[in-house]
Image (cartoon, rainbow, N blue to C red):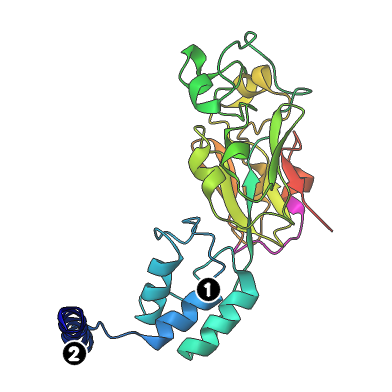
Amino acid sequence: MEILYAALVVGGVGLIIGIILSVSGKFLSVPVDEKEVAIREVLPGNNCGGCGFAGCDALAESIAKGESEPNACPVGGAECAKKIGEIVGIEAEAIKYVAYVKCAGDCDVAKQKYNYVGNYDCNDAANIPGGGAKSCGFGCLGLGSCVKACEFDAIHIVNGKAVVDKEKCKACKKCIAACPKKIIELIPYDAKYVVKCSSKDRGLDVKKACTAGCIGCGLCAKNCEYEAIQFVNNIAHIDQSKCQSCGKCMEKCPVKAIKKLHD
């Protein structure tokens, strides 16, 4: 009988606790936003931070609240934006972006001040006198900090300079954050012309450091009919939203510092 009583007591206590938990769950439960859950299922789940949020959960919450656009995820691309747009009832136009390294200073054209011996890391090299071994203090150091940061195997060091594989790039911006020289930017996937230089020097100082550098002459801007080229700190920059891909900037550049990416 003692065993029976003990079993009944334990069973009764368990039943009471179960009822309490069940009732508490109903009163203390947090309402679930079904729209947010649906958006989270569509997002790729990389948690890369390329959208500006800590992860996909935070982005899903922001989109569900109407604080972010359906195309806010750079990794998901057009298909992801379309699905999220259907969930929130907004037609989303997704422009695919890719990273681009604004430097042509590979081993063939960029001059060296000395042989670098140290940690194979751009951030370490940038902190030594002169900001690295290359004569141009603004160019790619070629030590691969951006390569280590990329989760998609989309950027590699080729002949001493970082090069992006646009077919693999997800525009997560991690390479941008990893580059101490700040010479990587996002451009539209179908951008046709780009300036392949980030030097803020002018004329002879540029050419002494790198034979492929922009000398800041301004001919590209003067010949652009669409006002798509601006000069900031002696370096030309193409506004891709205004560029009509006419190619006049590349034709007029005397040092061929403007590159055609595709036909």
Q: Residue 207: x and y, percent?
A: 68, 22
Q: Which mark is residue 259?
A: none
- Write the start and end of the magenta stretch as one range: 241-248
Instruction: Quickly name the residue at label 1.
Output: 71
Q: For this view, does 92 lie left or right of residue 196?
A: left
Count the marks: how many? 2
Residue 261 appears in the figure: yes
Instruction: Quickly name the residue at label 2.
Output: 23
* Neighbourhood count class around disc 1 (C-alpha, 10 Å): few under 14, some 14–19, many 20 upward: many
Main SS type for the magenta part?
Answer: loop
Residue at the outermost right position:
263
Residue 231 appears in the figure: no
Residue at 79%, 47% in the rendered image = 251
Residue at 55%, 77% in the rendered image = 42
Depth check, front residue: 101 or 234 = 101
Q: Is residue 116 above or below residue 75?
A: above
* Neighbourhood count class around disc 2 (C-alpha, 10 Å): few under 14, some 14–19, many 20 upward: few
